[in-house]
Image (spheres, rainbow, N blue to C red):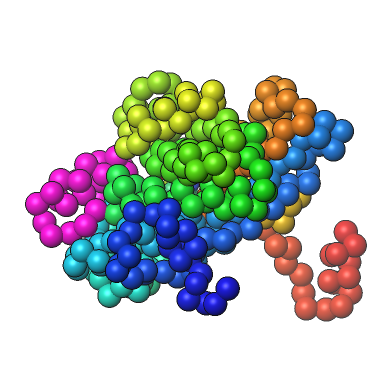
């Protein structure tokens, strides 16, 4: 593959609604690792579990897949500025791709609840960062209204190009596994991504690249679980800030994905989510952010309840990089031991 042939637009262009004369604004996103989780796979029961490591994308989350398409189309249509509400990763991706396209990015973030690395990204890429004394859902209403009356393109996942870009992750999984997973677990916040995966699997079914589709399992944090509760919620709360959303914009699409696939939604507590994050870091060598670990926490629950039959192939999406949220990581770990700079002191300490 030549460098200019990389990126999801170059690789899946014929499956994306992009005019042939539109050029791609790309950071060579996609083509992320699909890693077998040996600690959770079960040879005896012939259950194989894989993680799609989306933290390996250029800005550290799957949002890059959607953003390359959304920003390419905004540029093609002559837009000079983009706007989004964000729990962090959308703003990081919007800021980076806008910088690459020579466009302005305006990002609306909730008060306080944004992981440090994501804020650093938006600021460093030169976005105009506006913090509101409110939550993501309120920010979402504001950017929808502003993009109606100001000459700025909305690049949240209500922008249909976002989901088209993100569906390429499903293509990659099938192209790599050379089969359809039986189950697909993923974290659900605004619910764009589960809808995008379902679109991807469904398109592969239509073109005969698949004979069936996986069961979709949407994993939420218990404190921010509108799908589990069956109704939007006013005050979502979870340590997994990327999915701290009470009024998902892609509600109907996500519900349809779940129902058509005979799947389900589940909720996991913050403690269970962080335990899954540590499990991945300490047993698999994969450092994902808390929201991402929700999918693995969901797999652990399903395995414990014997909800996954023997012989199943399971994929879970790890949506973002662990480095995004260093505070939550450090707060779970023992502090480094402090000793004097002497051989004996260090020797004693490590044998302790
Ligand atoms: C955006 C995001 C999610 C949630 O995806 P939705 O499409 O909003 O459901 C989950 N994890 C991470 C790390 C994210 O950035």
Residue 74 in the image, given as x and y percentages of width and height:
25, 62
Q: Nearer the viewer, residue 188 or 213?
A: 213
Q: Nearer the viewer, residue 330 or 324?
A: 324
Q: Quick check: 275 left or right of 117? A: right
Looking at the image, is 59 positioned above or below residue 267? Answer: below
Looking at the image, is 142 positioned above or below residue 33? Answer: above
Looking at the image, is 67 positioned above or below residue 23? Answer: above
Q: Main secondary structure of the magenta part?
A: helix
Residue 330 appearing in the image: no
Q: Quick check: 154 left or right of 184? A: left
Q: Which residues are magenta?
A: 132-154
Q: Residue at x 39, y 54 (%)?
A: 16
Q: Nearer the viewer, residue 131 or 195?
A: 195
Where's the N terminus, which quadrant? bottom right
Residue 299 appearing in the image: yes
Q: Is residue 143 magenta?
A: yes
Residue 57 in the image, given as x and y percentages of width and height:
52, 62
Residue 105 in the image, given as x and y percentages of width and height:
26, 65
Q: Is residue 70 magenta?
A: no
Q: Residue at x 87, y 33 (%)?
A: 44
């Amino acid at each position: 593959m030549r460098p200019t042939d990389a990126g999801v637009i170059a690789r899946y262009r014929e499956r994306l609604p992009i005019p042939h004369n539109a050029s791609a604004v790309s950071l060579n996103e996609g083509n992320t690792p699909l890693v077998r989780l040996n600690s959770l796979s079960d040879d005896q029961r012939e259950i194989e579990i894989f993680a799609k490591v989306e933290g390996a994308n250029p800005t550290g989350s799957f949002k890059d897949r959607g953003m390359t398409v959304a920003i390419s189309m905004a540029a093609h249509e002559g837009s000079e500025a983009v706007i989004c509400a964000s729990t962090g990763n959308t703003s990081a991706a919007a800021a980076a791709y806008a910088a690459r396209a020579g466009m302005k990015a305006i990002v609306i973030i909730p008060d306080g609840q944004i992981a440090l690395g994501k804020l650093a990204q938006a600021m460093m890429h030169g976005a105009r960062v506006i913090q509101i004394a409110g939550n993501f859902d309120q920010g979402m209403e504001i950017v929808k209204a502003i993009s109606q009356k100001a000459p700025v393109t909305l690049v949240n996942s209500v922008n249909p190009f976002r989901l088209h870009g993100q569906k390429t992750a499903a293509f990659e999984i099938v192209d790599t596994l050379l089969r359809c997973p039986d189950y697909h677990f993923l974290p659900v916040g605004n619910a764009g991504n589960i809808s995008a995966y379902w679109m991807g699997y469904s398109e592969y079914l239509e073109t005969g690249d698949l004979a069936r589709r996986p069961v979709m399992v949407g994993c939420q944090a218990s404190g921010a679980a509108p799908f589990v509760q069956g109704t939007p919620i006013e005050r979502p709360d979870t340590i997994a800030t990327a999915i701290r959303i009470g009024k998902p914009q892609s509600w109907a699409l996500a519900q349809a994905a779940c129902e058509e696939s005979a799947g389900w939604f589940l909720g996991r507590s913050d403690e269970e989510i962080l335990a899954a994050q540590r499990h991945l870091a300490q047993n698999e060598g994969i450092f994902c952010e808390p929201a991402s670990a929700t999918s693995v926490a969901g797999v652990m629950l399903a395995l414990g309840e014997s909800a996954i039959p023997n012989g199943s192939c399971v994929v879970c999406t790890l949506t973002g990089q662990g480095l995004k949220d260093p505070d939550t990581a450090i707060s779970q770990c023992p502090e480094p031991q402090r000793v004097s700079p002497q051989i004996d002191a260090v020797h004693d300490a490590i044998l302790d």
